[in-house]
């Protein structure tokens, strides 16, 4: 992720550097041991994945009737345990 307006060439350089690190066997093994799936596939693949996942989880959330918690005193969204105030923060543990 990078701020909006980050030059595409810089995004590509960062993606290449991260990909090289993720392809190092010791890094990939350590991340896998922590339950992560290192990919390092590049900006467009990440954007496509995020779009697909957003559609999928939006359907799940709507079907389950999940709503954001409201701070009853202020009638605003409460910050999650990660400090994301007013932003969805969904952590799913399987």
Image (cartoon, rainbow, N blue to C red):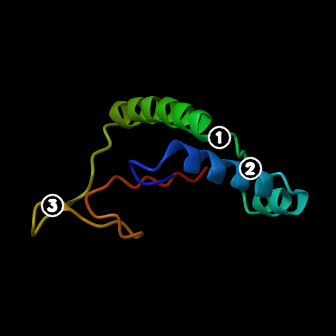
Residue at 52% across, 51% down:
92
> Position of 80 compared to 8: left or right?
left
The answer to whether the residues at label 1 and label 2 have Cβ atoms under 8 Å apart is yes
Front-most of residues 63 and 76: 76
Label located before the other in sequence (2 or 3): 2
In the image, residue 85 lies at what x, y percent? 28, 64
Does residue 89 lie above or below 60 as drawn?
below
In the image, residue 8 lies at what x, y percent? 52, 43
Q: CA distance from mark 2 to mark 3?
A: 39 Å
Does residue 81 lie above or below 49 as drawn?
below
Q: Nearer the viewer, mark 1 or mark 3?
A: 1
Counting other residues with Cα less than 10 Å from the Cα at mark 3, is it few (<14), some (14-19), or many (20 or more)? few
Q: Label 1, on which residue? A: 42
Label located before the other in sequence (1 or 2): 2
In the image, residue 23 lies at what x, y percent? 83, 51
Q: Nearer the viewer, mark 2 or mark 3?
A: 2
> Position of 5 compared to 91: left or right?
left
Secondary structure at badge 1 equals: loop
Does residue 14 lie above or below 47 as drawn?
below
Q: Which of the 4 image quadrants contains residue 30?
A: bottom right
Secondary structure at badge 2 equals: helix
Label located before the other in sequence (1 or 3): 1
Q: Label 2, on which residue? A: 19
Secondary structure at badge 3 equals: strand
Q: CA distance from mark 1 to mark 2?
A: 8 Å
Q: Label 3, on which residue? A: 76
Residue at 36% across, 70% down:
83
Counting other residues with Cα less than 10 Å from the Cα at mark 2, is it few (<14), some (14-19), or many (20 or more)? some
């Amino acid at each position: 992720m990078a701020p909006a307006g980050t030059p595409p060439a810089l995004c590509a350089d960062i993606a290449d550097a991260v990909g090289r690190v993720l392809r190092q066997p010791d890094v990939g093994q350590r991340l896998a041991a922590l339950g992560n799936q290192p990919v390092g596939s590049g900006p467009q693949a990440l954007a496509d994945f995020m779009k697909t996942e957003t559609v999928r989880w939006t359907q799940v959330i709507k079907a389950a009737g999940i709503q954001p918690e409201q701070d009853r005193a202020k009638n605003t969204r409460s910050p999650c345990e990660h400090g994301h105030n007013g932003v969805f923060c969904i952590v799913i543990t399987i």
